[in-house]
Amino acid sequence: MEAIRARVDKVLAAVSIGLFVVLLVVVCWQVLSRQVLQTPAAWTEETARYLFVILALLSASLVFSERGHIAVEILMARFPVRVQKVVAVLVELLVIFFALYVLVLGGYRVAENSWNQGLSAIPVSVGQMYLVLPLAGVLITFYSLCHLRGLLRGTTGPVPEGDVVAADV
Amino acid sequence: MDTATLVALVLVGGMVLLIALGVPIAVAMGLPSAVATMVLLGWDGAALTSAQRLFSGSNSFALLAIPFFVLAGGLMNAGGLARRLIDFALVVAGRLPASLAQTTVVANTLFGAVSGASVASAAAVGSVLAPRMKEEGYDPAFSAAVNAAASPTGMLIPPSNTFIIYSLVSGTSVAALFMAGIGPGLLWSGICVLMVALYARKRPELRATERPTLRQGLLVLWRAVPALFMMVVVVGGILVGAFTATESAVIAVVYALVAGFATRTLKVGALPGVILEAAKTTAIVMLLIGVSGILAWVMSFARIPTLVSDAMLGLTDNKVLVLLMIMVVLLIAGTVMDPTPAILIFTPIFLPIVTGLGVSPIHFGAMMVFNMCLGNISPPVGNNLFVAARVAGVKVEPVIGRLMPMFYALTASLFIVTFVPELSMWLPEQLGLINAP
Amino acid sequence: GGEGAEASGGSGSGSEGGEGRALRLALNQTEQHPSYLALDSFGQRLSEATDDRWSIEVFANETLGAQAEALQLVSSGAVDMAIVSGTQLENLDEDFVVFNLPTVFDSVEQQMSVVNDPDVVGDLYSSLESSENITVVGGFTQGTRSVYTTDGPVETPEDLAGKKMRVQESDLHLSMMEAMGGSPTPLAFGEVYTALQSGVIDGAENNEVSYFTQKHHEVAPFYSRTNHLVGLDYLIINTGVLSEMSEEDRAAFDEEWTAAHEEHTQLWTEATEQAIADAEAAGATFSEVDTDAFNAVLEPLVDEFLTTDSQRALYDAARGN
Ligand code: NA
Ligand code: NA
């Protein structure tokens, strides 16, 4: 399972970097086409917005792999390790419920609901874009299952070793 | 119990409980919001609506500025541009008493003007200056405290990702907000300079560092020009309207790339790592913004902002008292909350109240972000405080003791920002960025 | 009492027997906008006419979502009603493009008589019922749109040559501005003022009300009446909700809707006149253009966008052909 996770991490990291570069190129093109070529492109803004949501959701899934999302751990850190372990399992279960209910089920429902709703400037439907939601939900569930396994086996500590710099905006 | 009260209970109770358990804040906000939606719309309707709000909450062109400003900052740190800014700050502040402490303040201010965030600034400035301050006899806890206190200016001085997030939830102009942040940002730095000067009077042995020769000074200035010019490009470009905030962030990335390669301080091999870090940093924030879309929707649907507003205005409709109450609530929230979730949660509740009392949403943005900056250094949870302590190699507790006088002075200046609207509003008004009278 | 019923409802929670049903309506405008005012009094009259069995609660300022998302929420039943633009419906069913085209309407009056005439729009308005669970109730005008520029009035398409004109982000609007002679520049609405001021763009196109309320007249004082488009918003409602109405209540709903769009047109006309007077007082000039010259370049464009027989039939019906 850890081997699969390492591969998924690698793929997600590569996809994130790739999407980021494409995003950069698209917005550069928007500036360039308006300021320099004087022939503004219509598709750039919509494309950039949706690329960004996809990038954000996939990278956010990757951050779940590292348990890197901001959390307040000061309270839990004061409890005995046994309690911490139980709570850590509960936390992963809550994350799984959120991922399955909102991202997978809700994402599937909303994609189906808007499958025929076209976008204005690019030939894709809103529903197709929404498919990234269930994809992210599956990825996050997978990572949480990995953490659960680690917690139960004792190979994963109850409190993530977060890095505050990563939360900086 | 009516539905609105039930929804409010689910939201508040759920979020407090889950945050306390250490659930990632994005899930701790999103899950109770989805459950509250379930109360209103049933199982399937709530799933669909929550998913849609999460997606569309982050689907905004203005938010695109965030990944690019984060990446630009990462590129500056990976290359040597950040270091050159610090060298420049040393020359600027080198003649003042306790010059290294003053340099810390100046360097953080300069950093703030080229990057959209503030924790990175504390890390970069502290890791260079803290060891030197220790060598020259400064108390490491004090040097960490100065660095922590000075670093949040990056959130006030443009570019600022915090203002971009506020702009999204308040529907205000990013350009106007950026200009509104300059006054409070400089006030923040000014208070830090003042506090360091007061400290220096008690510690006369902390003299100025050796004076650089004119030649040395010019050389440092010359080497800092690429980094300094970035401010001109980014802020100037937005101001003259050549590009939007989002586009200016892309320009900043391209600029940091070109400047990094031109000065041979940036290596191609470092790029994938820098980009991935920027993607992850952004993703953390975007997920928060996405789930706050669910929260904001369910609050509106249940008319909760109206309830809070009625309750608050039932106590008093005196503008000064209402603003005081709001600022105190935000200060308390800021002790444990990060700026992004705090802005996302509280803006939809408080903004209608204050605009109803005649406060400009731009001015409210300035006071809110100033308040969030205080939260970033206030114990027990303060990102800038933690990072400043860590890069100085000291524990957080002694730093807090050294920080408190500066924290109190800065908190006092929050009331200047709140009750002297001109400090924030003068510049955007002069520049014609505020259309309404 | 009616108070408790307000917070309940929504398709999932079921309705409490005997109590009224408050329809939640998503609106993208402020509470001062003619659309809000007309919808709010629509709700009040509906409530009176149905003895509080039905009422409408308007959520202004996009708090329930922007138009594209509000459309999805009406379709799913999370929200009961919404005001959405013609472009939004065009994204679901291409027949709606007809009423978004230039030259299809000459005036607000003609537009309102067409888009609220069941003989013309009956099939169109029910076309989304089976696939999307959405019924179109009718239309609200968004006024005639014309161009405005920073450096002098426009009379013919040649006058727009080389001018960067802000348009909404869609193929139709880009092609339209190109046909009219300008260089189309898609830009977020909120950026237009600064862009005009700094010379990033040379002009834009909009109705008189937005022209004045957004203060664009301060930086682009020449408003030239090309009247190339008459903007249109639709009121949509969840089909399932509509079918829950008794025949009597449905009749009241339709009757009060007619009163609502008439009131809206009246409010819109007054707002337009006020905007023109205020803009003129602030130094803006409103000038006429060579209408034939603009029609000559726009008509081929219309042909290009009318690709099906049903679209052509709607166009002809609207034009009274
Ligand atoms: Na900044
Ligand atoms: Na804090």
Image (cartoon, rainbow, N blue to C red):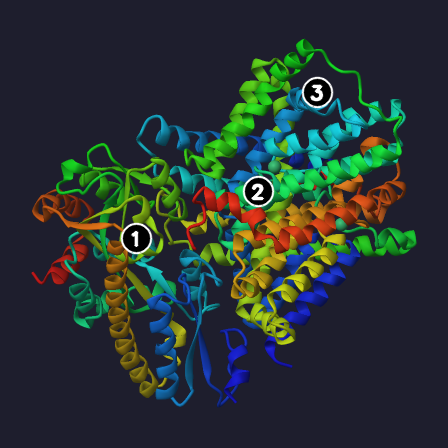
Please determine whether, in this image, residue C221 is positioned above or below residue B223: below
Q: Are marks 3 and 2 on the same chain?
A: no
Quarter the C terminus of chain C occupies: bottom left
On the same chain, marks 3 and 1? The answer is no
At a point 73% along the width and 34% down the height, the residue shown is B122
Q: Mark 2 = which residue?
A: A56
Who is closer to the viewer here, A11 or C315? C315
- Disc number at residue C155? none
Residue at 72% x, 25% y: name it.
B93
Q: Up-down: is C272 above or below B380? A: below
Residues at circles 3 and 1 in contact by the CB criterion of under 8 Å: no
* Kind of residue indicated by mark 1: Tyr
Residue B335 image offset from top left, x and y in percent: 76, 53
Q: Chain of mark 2?
A: A
Residue B70 in percent (x, y) is at: 60, 35
Confirm or reject: label 3 Cβ below 8 Å from ligand 1: no
Output the chain of dot 1.
C
Which residue carries the number 3 mark?
B91
Secondary structure type for disc 3: helix
Q: Chain of mark 3?
A: B
User: Quick check: which quadrant has ligand 1?
Assistant: top right
In the rendering, at what x and y percent does residue B63 appear? 52, 44
